[in-house]
Image (cartoon, rainbow, N blue to C red):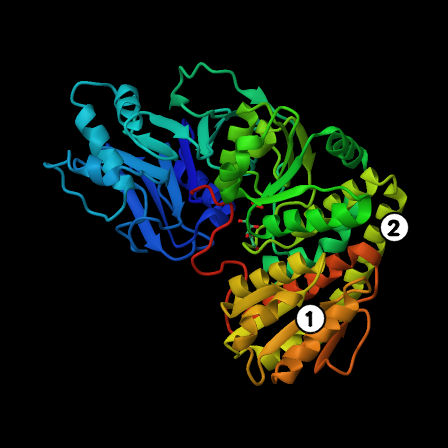
Amino acid sequence: MCGIFGYIGSDNNAADKVFKGLIDIEYRGYDSWGVSYFQGNSFKTVKKTGFLPSIFNFPSSSISIGHTRWATHGGVTEINAHPHLSCDNKLVLVHNGIVENYRELKKELTNHKIKSETDSEIIIHLIEDQLQDKNLKDAVSEVFNKLEGLNAIVISDGKEIVVCKKGSPLVLGKTENGYVVASDPNAILPLTKKLIFLEDGDLFSLDAGLDPEFKEIDWQYTKADLDKFPHFMLKEIYEQPQVLYNQIQSLDAAREIAEEIKAAFGTYFVGCGSASYTCLLAEYAFSKISKKHINFSIGSEFDYKEDFLTNKSLLIAVSQSGETIDVVEPVAHAKKRGVKIVALTNTLGSTLYRMADIKHLLNAGPEKAVASTKAVIAMVANILLYAYSLAGKLDLGIKVIEDSAREIENIIKRQDEIKKLADKIYNVQHIFVLGRGISYPVALEATLKIKETSYIHAEGFASGELKHGCLALVDKGTPVIVFLPNDETKAAVLANAMEVKARGAFVIGVGFENNPVFDFFFEVKDVGASSVLPHIVFAQFLGYFLAIKLGLNPDKPRNLAKSVTVK
Ligand code: F6R
């Protein structure tokens, strides 16, 4: 969370470079932004609340740092936006992370004028104090060692930029005429492919004498633009059939990982949010397809279950960004216990990618909308392929993935039916979603898409669970979505649909066959175990159209950001 970008060099358009870089990483936080640039002999700073504008004209300068914020300490105001300045206005700082002991540290700052409510501003004043008898690098080092928590900071005094990090990602790049620093390598690639990924505890001063070796990498910058689409979410939903076809181009990784699962003494799929639902889905898929038990955990809970991990365990970390701290931390702990790590991620060079023994890229292309769509589809497809490979039925796996891609193409053509549903239910307070077996995680994913894009309260259930308490919430007209795949769950799911219908629910069936219990039906052809994929796409469209009907921006939901790098 929070985007960081900085430039120092002999080019005189530093602030423009920083501004462009921030546009690329705005998904990391978008409640406010700011850019400082050194002009004459002092820093000038622009700070605004809200999204970045598409253009901003900055005067010439050769040092600049900028930030897009996802608020943790202090509300969304211009004063709380970064960069923060020292009392003498000679130092500027941008920060990502949380200074857990900032209240204690603030007590040392009796003779400083603190302007914001942030933990970040404390850092710059502490450094200002240290500068009385130290150079900038040593002052930063002294202060950074006092900070508790996971933090990345970038500071400049107008002569150099000093960077350091623990936990939060930072990447340096060497250009023809200078250096760049950013929280995301993709944002640096338009300027240079000579990179260094900072490790925890690294501290560098970006100046001509910078000695560590930059590695030339052969990655391509993948620009994501809207083309003809009004929103990235819609564009990314449309890309999904192709993303699925990409997954079956090369199956070496699926085969290798299936072998690792076979050999391991305990396999754990770990992820957060939507990725965690794909991990839960893995538990059902492996049981059903390969008759194998695997374990699932939410990333932020995995630390509390790690005691029994051994060097024979296998951990499969599932993450679009590869930066989610709630996955990175337990992976780091498991690694110390000798656990073999697989990263199933969309992001080349990300922290998880670099930590993993086996790296499997999702090849879904950059995902810009905060609500994950095509990355989730690619995760689920690969999990199914691992399970089919382990069962020795990879050909069947390929077939069902192809069938599901075709069915998603079909849903894209029929999206108006889902739009009509959104127009009918957009003003409700609650939506419930039911699924059994492998469709239970689909129900959870469906509710997350609805919640984050439309802010309507939605709850997903294993459909048998509803009558154990939450049925009390179902009232006349409450929309209840029921996933009905052509599998062993259908009779029981229909019985549960009857139960909610009897309480007055507006029952929305999504599946292979209509039934009188449904008040609204959206047909999804039976494509075997991979029916979960088109079912998820139904929910993505519903979330998207609910947002549009409610006048909300589906790409940038309130309070959220992509790439969650704080705990
Ligand atoms: C939901 C969503 C989030 C992410 C979660 C994990 O639409 O996008 O729930 O799935 O924050 O992110 P990654 O996959 O980057 O680890």
* Quadrant location of the N terminus in the rendered image: top left
Front-most of residues 464 and 435:
464
Give the vertical position of 33 relative to 249 (above or below). Answer: below
Q: Is residue 19 left or right of residue 232?
A: left
Name the residue type under label 1. Val
Gap between marks 1 and 2, in whole Å? 26 Å
Give the vertical position of 285 relative to 50 (above or below). Answer: above
Q: Helix or strand or loop: what does disc 2 sit on?
A: helix
* Quadrant location of the C terminus in the rendered image: top left
Question: Which mark is drawn over residue 388?
Answer: none
> Crowding at label 2, few (<14), some or many (≥20) Cα neighbours within 10 Å?
some
Outermost front residue: 468
Q: How many marks?
A: 2
Q: Is residue 18 left or right of residue 48?
A: right
Q: Which residue is mark 2?
A: 399
Name the residue type under label 2. Lys
Q: Earlier in the sequence, mark 1 or mark 2?
A: 2
Identify the residue at horizontal 29%, vertical 25% (top origin). 140
Identify the residue at horizontal 46%, vertical 35% (top origin). 182
Ligand 1 closer than 8 Å to label 2 CB = no
Percent of width and height locating residue 111? 10, 36
Percent of width and height locating residue 232? 60, 57
Q: Helix or strand or loop: what does disc 1 sit on?
A: strand
Percent of width and height locating residue 238? 70, 59
Identify the residue at horizontal 58%, vertical 30% (top origin). 309
Q: Is residue 116 left or right of residue 185?
A: left
Identify the residue at horizontal 65%, vertical 72% (top origin). 481
The picture quadrant where one finds residue 392 is top right
Question: Which mark is drawn over residue 482?
Answer: 1
